[in-house]
Amino acid sequence: MEQTLELEQAAAQLAELGHPTRLGIFRLLVRAGRQGIAVGDIQQVLEIPNSTLSHHLSKMSKVDLMEQRRDGRTLYCTLKFEQVEALLGFLYSECCIEAPESLAGMSEEKRGCCD
């Protein structure tokens, strides 16, 4: 059951990142680091209406990729790095486990494995 939930969560997160605007937001959040970025700055960089941005931020929050915090009058968005790391870990968790014997002696760089 846990594997199914992990698969469903990963699929939901990847689906949300499959939209160009949300992928753009994601990249801005990565660049901003743990301090986050103001919603107004995201809107300015992406040049999209506030209502559209709100829609995309809501979808990313729903799948636990980001969170928001208020500091005075400014609303900041921060990437949930632990969730992104978990997603990447899930994607790489079975890297090369069924690799042919011919790859066994190769360096990790050459076979593309993360181990």
Image (cartoon, helix red, strand yellow):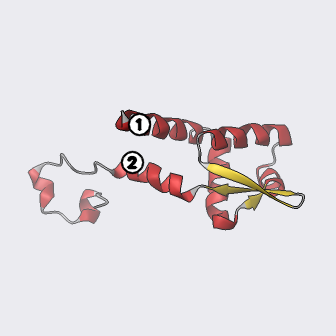
Q: Does residue 34 show up?
A: yes
Please give the name of the residue rendered at 81% of the width and 48% of the height, measured from the top-left corner.
Answer: 47
Query: Which residue is located at x 83 percent, y 37 percent?
Result: 51
| Element at label 2 | helix
Residue 49 in view (yes/no): no
* Looking at the image, residue 42 lies above or below residue 1: below
The numbered mark, 2 or 1, whose residue comes first in the sequence reads 1
Q: Is 12 rendered above or below residue 64? A: above
The type of residue carrying mark 2 is: Phe
Query: Label 2 neighbourhood size at 10 Å, few (<14), some (14-19), many (20+)?
Result: some
Residue 109 in percent (x, y) is at 28, 64
Residue 45, given in percent of the width and then of the height, sits at 78, 55
Instruction: Choose top left, top right, bottom left or bottom right for residue 114.
Output: bottom left
Q: Quadrant of the N terminus?
A: top left
Q: Please, what is the three-letter code of the amino acid marked with disc 1?
A: Leu
Quadrant housing the C terminus? bottom left
Q: Residues within 10 Å of mark 1 (few under 14, many from 20)?
A: some
Which of 99/94 is in front?
Answer: 94
Measured as percent of width and height from the top left, residue 107 is found at 21, 66
User: Residue 90 shows which numbered tag?
Assistant: 2
Examine the image and state in which quarter residue 16 appears.
Answer: top right
Q: Position of residue 7 (x, y in %)?
A: 41, 36
Q: Which mark is residue 52?
A: none
From the viewer's perspective, tell me whether residue 15 is left or right of residue 54: left
Q: Is residue 101 left or right of residue 18?
A: left
Q: Residue furthest left?
A: 101
Disc 1: which residue: 7
> Which element carries disc 1, helix, strand or loop?
helix
Depth check, front residue: 62 or 104? 62
